[in-house]
Image (cartoon, grey):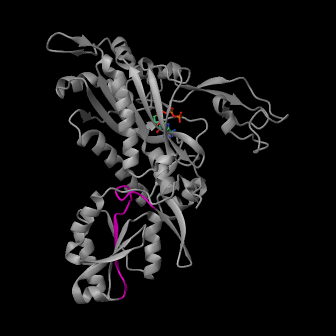
Amino acid sequence: MADAVTMDKIVSLSRRRGFVFPSSEIYGGMGSTFDYGHYGVLMKNNIRERWFEAMVRNRDDIVAIDSAIILHPKVWEASGHVAGFTDPLIDCRTCKLRFRADKLEDSQCGLKPSKHPGETPECDLTEPRRFNLMFETTVGALQEEGSRAYLRPETAQGIFINFKNVLQIARRKPPFGIAQIGKSFRNEITPGNFLFRVREFEQMEMEFFVPPDEAEKWYRYWIDERLNWYRRYGLRDSKLRVREHGPEERSHYSQGTSDIEYEYPIGWGELEGIANRGDFDLTQHAEYSTTKLEYVGQDGERYVPYVIEPAVSIERIMVALLVDAYDEEVVGERERTVLRLHPKMAPVTAAILPLIGKSDDMVAKARSLYEDLRRRHSVEYDDSGAIGRRYRRQDEIGTPWAFTVDEQTLADDTVTVRDRDSLAQERIPIAGVGEWLEGALERDWKSPKAN
Ligand code: ATP
């Protein structure tokens, strides 16, 4: 069966079920800015947690950092962002819209949306101009020269400027990495496609410092590691690919860049970038700050490490997970929408439902199971409405399992477990539910969606 997913369906489900709302709606909205509702927050927490676990907690060679969002303005001079973090911009004098000169094929003409800018006789385009994507702000009470600062457009620089601290205080030696999760801001000219391109997003970046002659090996290693992470969390192989940049496409600092791409409903797009940044950043900061940023070994060996960087945003992962999970099917003549999310990514791990919401006995048993499970898991209790409706609600938010307390529970203390994907039901003792859930969460999981 063809994949039923479209970006519109994802946007509408996200809104209907309270994952993501358009921001500032009561004031008429703020284009391409979003607020996360309860399930969106839970899902973002899961994405963050799974990344942190793979990149920091389960490793001996990577430590965490949380740097400031507003850094010394010189950081962005050294990094090349003040001079070079720009997109080429074109204005149309007729429709007054603004486009990225390098993305005209992805844009729509303001007068004739079926055409690209420049394709109608009325189009009157300016020459491209450079436009810096950094948001500026002023620090302190006086808006004078010297108080200008920027909101960080990437988290990476906050890592480089702490290289020396980590080397000395965390007593690390290359190869080692520093990981950071936090908001980044870019004044994107053409944001859009839901969360795919937004002006504020949460980046997860890791800078891995290595001896220069090992850079190529580690670059390949991180491409594989990151690709495997997406596979582990259920993204289908047919929707993932690695695309290596040609020399003309690479950023100024890069010695090699590969994108892990996902096939979004809008086509293949960058999910995560893995770059070999060479010694560019440490060398620049050493020069601008006049602080030596190098590794000195006990035997006197010294060098400026090369850096391998996997960089991604929670937003792009969230869209990929939602798109990959979205499914529609007809079961017993009724249509259901279901998010077939990996159980460790789903906002709610299990629903606890009394079959009859008005039965005090069932409610008491279900509540007690819920109170027990909520200490360790993200679980939800629901006793309102028909059971079928409650199941479908959980299907739509991607809850992998539901435990239902029914008539038989009152007689023998067993509950049914309903599986979101197969709809199979089995009975297990109520006392064993916690253990059952732990086991189920550790099982390998593969998307039941056809490729
Ligand atoms: P693009 O070419 O799509 O603008 P980029 O190459 O500028 O992306 P990087 O600077 O490599 O992106 O940023 C690293 C990661 O941060 C990207 O792979 C993506 O996951 C995420 N990211 C970048 N810009 C945005 C954005 N505007 N909204 C959401 N996520 C973003």
Picture coordinates of residue 398 (x, y %)?
43, 63
- Work out whether 447 lies above or below 392: above
Give the magenta part as a residue range. Answer: 340-358
Q: Report the residue at 27% width, 85% height from top.
A: 409
Q: Report the residue at 34% width, 67% height from top.
A: 350
Residue 142 colored magenta?
no
Q: Nearer the viewer, residue 73 or 228?
A: 228
Q: Main secondary structure of the magenta part?
A: loop
Q: Report the residue at 45% width, 23% height from top.
A: 256
For the N terminus, the quadrant is: bottom right
Q: Nearer the viewer, residue 150 or 228?
A: 228
Residue 347 colored magenta?
yes
Single out the residue that lies furthest toward the left.
Answer: 298
Picture coordinates of residue 82 (x, y %)?
49, 21
Q: How many marks?
A: 0
| Residue 47 appears left or right of 85 | left
Q: Name which quarter of the figure residue 311 lies in.
A: top left
Q: Nearer the viewer, residue 35 or 326?
A: 326
- Work out whether 208 lies above or below 379: above
